[in-house]
Image: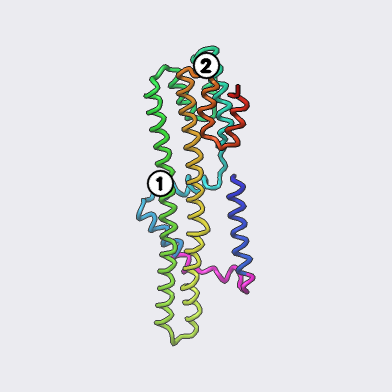
């Protein structure tokens, strides 16, 4: 689990609850079944109307858990691994990498090295790996678009609930016992919509976007590393190529360690 995401969720929830009690209310003050159906239920089924059952289930079962998962995007570890493979390939030949391929946890790197070991042309390797990278970006973009759509729908249904509550209040203005409940629906639906959009879906979309950028960079490094190994480049040249993807501090560190004269 991603510690930052968990702390953000728990800490943000705690701040909202503290604000509720500090203002003289309780959590139950903000629990309203009509508002739940209007804002949460309404926006959920509107999203399903837009994307369909299959995609919404994919969002809930795949994209949501990803927002709270931890992934290792260490470029330095990748450079070190590629350097080892490049040295082995130059010393023993590229076919010597065949045994090491099955031990790699990264399927993308496995695929690239397998193609290189099988003697595929460099252009074919690049095209195949670029296609896979493009498909990954497409899936991530789809998840972000769905989160963005839900973030826009939730406040809209919150405003719809506000209108419904005000209409009900005005139609029963002579019944003072109905004013409070109707006003609650009018305001709580807006509250729910703002929470869903600004506390959940927008941050989750940002998390997916950041992860997509990090994973894309790592896979681009894999492509360059595989092609460099396939071309028989000096391992130091490979390190210099891959170091360009790292931040200045990490770049200096790997070059000093592997490519410095």
The picture places residue 95, in percent across and down from the top left corner, at 49, 14
Quarter of the figure with the C terminus: top right
Q: Residue at x 51, y 43 (%)?
A: 211
Magenta includes 24? yes
Q: Is residue 253 above or below residue 1?
A: above
Q: Residues within 10 Å of mark 2 (few under 14, many from 20)?
A: many
Q: Which mark is residue 142?
A: 1
Q: Is residue 181 above or below residue 37?
A: below
Magenta includes 25? yes
Q: Is 21 positioned to the left or the right of 155 in the image?
A: right
Q: Residue at x 42, y 77 (%)?
A: 166
- The local secondary structure at tag 1 comes to helix
Q: Is 162 positioned to the left or the right of 199 in the image?
A: left
In the orientation shown, which residue stands out farthest toward the top?
92
Q: Is residue 239 above or below residue 164?
A: above
Depth check: 168 or 151 in front? 151
Residue 75 found in image quarter: top right
The picture places residue 74, in percent across and down from the top left corner, at 57, 35
Magenta part of the chain: 21-38
**Image marks 2 and 1: residues in contact by CB distance under 8 Å:** no
Circle 2 residue: 89
Which secondary structure type mostly characterizes the magenta part of the structure? helix
- The local secondary structure at tag 2 comes to helix
């Amino acid at each position: 689990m991603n510690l930052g995401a968990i702390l953000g969720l728990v800490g943000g929830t705690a701040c909202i609850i503290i604000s509720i009690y500090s203002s003289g209310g309780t959590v139950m003050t903000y629990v309203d079944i009509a508002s739940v159906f209007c804002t949460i239920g309404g926006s959920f089924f509107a999203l399903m109307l837009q994307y369909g059952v299959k995609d919404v289930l994919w969002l809930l079962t795949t994209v949501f858990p990803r927002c709270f998962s931890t992934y290792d995007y260490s470029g330095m570890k990748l450079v070190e691994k590629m350097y080892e493979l490049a040295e082995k390939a130059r010393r023993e030949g590229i076919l010597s990498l065949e045994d090491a391929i099955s031990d790699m946890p990264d399927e993308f790197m496995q695929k690239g090295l397998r193609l290189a070991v099988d003697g595929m042309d460099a252009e074919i390797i690049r095209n195949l790996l670029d296609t896979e990278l493009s498909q990954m970006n497409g899936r991530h973009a789809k998840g972000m678009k769905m989160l963005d759509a839900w973030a826009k729908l939730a406040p809209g249904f919150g405003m719809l609930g506000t209108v419904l509550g005000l209409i009900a209040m005005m139609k029963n203005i002579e019944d003072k016992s109905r004013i409070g409940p109707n006003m609650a629906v009018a305001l709580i639906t807006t509250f729910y919509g703002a929470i869903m959009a600004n506390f959940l879906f927008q941050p989750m979309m940002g998390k997916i976007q950041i992860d997509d950028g990090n994973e894309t960079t790592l896979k681009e490094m894999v492509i360059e590393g595989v092609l460099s190994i396939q071309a028989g480049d000096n391992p130091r040249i490979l390190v210099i190529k891959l170091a360009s993807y790292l931040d200045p501090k990490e770049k200096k560190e790997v070059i000093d360690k592997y490519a410095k004269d």
